[in-house]
């Protein structure tokens, strides 16, 4: 498994928005999502009816971009990896608690196990730029 360095971890923990890319029938699909970094993986909440969820059921490969665009000062982490779907159990409960703490929208519209899954992207490739690594 690929590990994030200290600057990448700091950057990822400072943000809450990303874009996830999946595909179906060789057609790319990209959408904005909320995420958290958890134990060197990217965790995203989704719904069962989404194109993203349906794509990942057929093809677990995904990519995510977490970035801040500023002309001349772009910062980003891009990952590619396999995705696991977490729908219930102790891991689900732990991840839900993290999302509940971080995101107001989760507190406003809570859900339970098997009502909406988490996507766990396990990086097998990454690249970052614009982060001070000195």
Image (tube, rainbow, N blue to C red):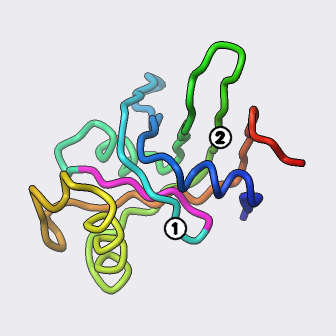
The image quadrant that residue 84 belongs to is bottom left
Looking at the picture, does residue 7 appear above or below residue 107?
above
Farthest residue toward the left?
109
Give the residue number, with chain letter if any, for mark 2: 77
**Residue 34 spot, x, y in % from top left:** 36, 46
Q: Point out the tag, 1 or 2, that comes first from the N-terminus.
A: 1
**Can residue 119 be found in the magenta stretch?**
no
Neighbour tally class for label 1: few under 14, some 14-19, many 20 plus, Cα within 10 Å: few
Point out which mark residue 38 bears.
1
The image quadrant that residue 116 belongs to is bottom left
Neighbour tally class for label 2: few under 14, some 14-19, many 20 plus, Cα within 10 Å: many
Using the rendered image of the protein, determine whether residue 69 is visible from the camera's viewpoint.
yes
**Residue 79 spot, x, y in % from top left:** 63, 44
Looking at the picture, does residue 94 appear above or below residue 33?
below
Alpha-carbon distance for marks 1 and 2?
Answer: 15 Å
Q: Quadrant of the N terminus?
A: bottom right
Using the rendered image of the protein, determine whether residue 2 is visible from the camera's viewpoint.
no
Secondary structure of the magenta portion, mostly?
A: strand
**Which residue is pictured at 56% across the width and 62% down the height?**
41
Instruction: Indicate left or right for 45 with 4 as reference.
Output: left
**Residue 17 spot, x, y in % from top left:** 42, 41
Magenta range? 40-46
Farthest residue toward the right?
134
**Which residue is pictured at 53% across the width and 46% down the height?**
61
**Which residue is pictured at 38% across the width and 53% down the height?**
44
Point out which mark residue 72 bears.
none
**Residue 88 spot, x, y in % from top left:** 26, 77
Farthest residue toward the bottom?
90
Instruction: Indicate left or right for 82 with 100 as reference.
Output: right
The image quadrant that residue 45 belongs to is bottom left
Looking at the picture, does residue 62 appear above or below residue 43?
above
């Amino acid at each position: 498994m690929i590990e994030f360095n200290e600057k990448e971890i700091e950057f990822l923990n400072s943000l809450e928005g990303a874009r996830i890319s999946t595909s179906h029938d060789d057609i790319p699909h990209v959408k904005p999502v909320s995420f958290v970094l958890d134990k060197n993986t990217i965790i995203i909440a989704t719904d069962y009816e989404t194109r993203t969820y349906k794509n990942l059921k057929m093809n677990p490969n995904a990519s995510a971009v977490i970035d801040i665009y500023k002309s001349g000062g772009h910062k980003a982490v891009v990952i590619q990896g396999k995705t696991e779907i977490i729908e219930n159990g102790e891991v689900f409960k732990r991840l839900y608690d993290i999302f509940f703490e971080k995101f107001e929208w989760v507190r406003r519209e809570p859900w339970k196990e098997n009502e909406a899954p988490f996507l766990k992207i396990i990086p097998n490739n990454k690249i970052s730029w614009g982060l001070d690594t000195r």
